[in-house]
Image: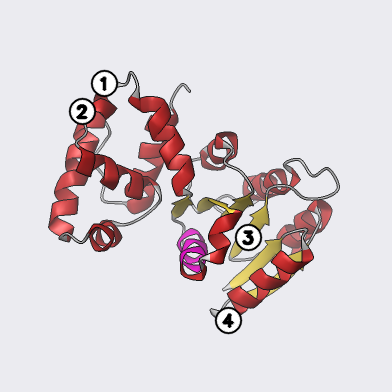
Amino acid sequence: MRVVLAEDLFLLRDGLVRLLQAHGFEIAAAVETGPELAAALAELDPDVAVVDVRLPPTLTDEGLQCALEARRKRPGLPVLVLSQHVEQLYARELLADGTGGVGYLLKDRVFDAEQFVDAVRRVAAGGTAMDPQVIQQLLARRSGDDRPLARLTPREREVLELMAQGRSNAAIAGKLVVTERAIAKHTANIFVKLGLEVSDDDNRRVLAVLAYLDHGR
């Protein structure tokens, strides 16, 4: 699996290169600026891009914008964005085209090698990997006056949070130490209570949940 990596901090970039290589990824390019990223994505046709939001020369959201432009040219290009802080706008922009193959993690997550590598693989496979803190903020913003969300049981809210992170029913069952059948029942109840179309497609249901949580906010 070929990766284009963009990170302006040398030590972190080098660490990510070593980590990904140790887990069987091929690093097609490891760059530090926006223009270098744009060129690498256009020329190398990677299987997945791992991109810092803020890159030189602007150090604003140049990395994100380069990734979005690359996805416009190659719809569905898998992109995992890394950010220092939770910015829900970044998540919305990534999810806007509804095609999946996107992820948004805080940089702290890279220190959990298993979690980070799982996220890269999930995104590369066309799935979605959203940082738990993003989901928690969206849930908190909707929980005050949103009746459908308020109707969820505590267990259903746990399942919803894990579902929105991009986890499959099997992964959620393992995390909560229950049967996969029990999770299937919870997810069906969640979709009914939120007024969403029931779906067995992991990526589509994640996008539906995130669209609901962020709708109109």
Q: Is residue 187 left or right of residue 93?
A: left
> Alpha-carbon distance for marks 1 and 3?
38 Å
Can you give x and y, in whole percent of width and height, for residue 188 in the image? 18, 42
> Alpha-carbon distance for marks 1 and 4?
47 Å
Mark 2 and mark 3 lie on one chain; the one further toward the N terminus is 3
Q: Nearer the viewer, residue 43 or 107?
A: 107
> Alpha-carbon distance for marks 2 and 3?
38 Å
Q: Which mark is residue 151?
A: 2
> Alpha-carbon distance for marks 3 and 4?
17 Å
User: In the rendered structure, are the residues bearing label 3 and label 4 in contact, judged by CB atoms less than 8 Å apart?
Assistant: no
User: In the rendered structure, are the residues bearing label 1 and label 2 in contact, judged by CB atoms less than 8 Å apart?
Assistant: yes
Q: Which mark is residue 91?
A: none
Q: The residue under label 1 is which amino acid type?
A: Arg
Q: How is the image coloured?
A: secondary structure
Q: Secondary structure at mark 3?
A: strand
Q: Specify the quadrant that holds the N terminus.
A: bottom right
Q: Secondary structure at mark 1?
A: helix
> Alpha-carbon distance for marks 1 and 2?
6 Å
Q: Secondary structure at mark 4?
A: helix
Q: Which image quadrant for residue 197?
A: top left
Please determine whether, in this image, residue 58 is positioned above or below residue 8. above
Q: Which mark is residue 49?
A: 3
Task: Identify the residue under disc 4.
Answer: 22
Q: Nearer the viewer, mark 3 or mark 4?
A: 4
Mark 1 and mark 4 lie on one chain; the one further toward the N terminus is 4
Can you give x and y, in whole percent of width and height, for residue 184 in the image? 18, 51
Q: Which mark is residue 147?
A: 1
Residue stretch in magenta: 115-123
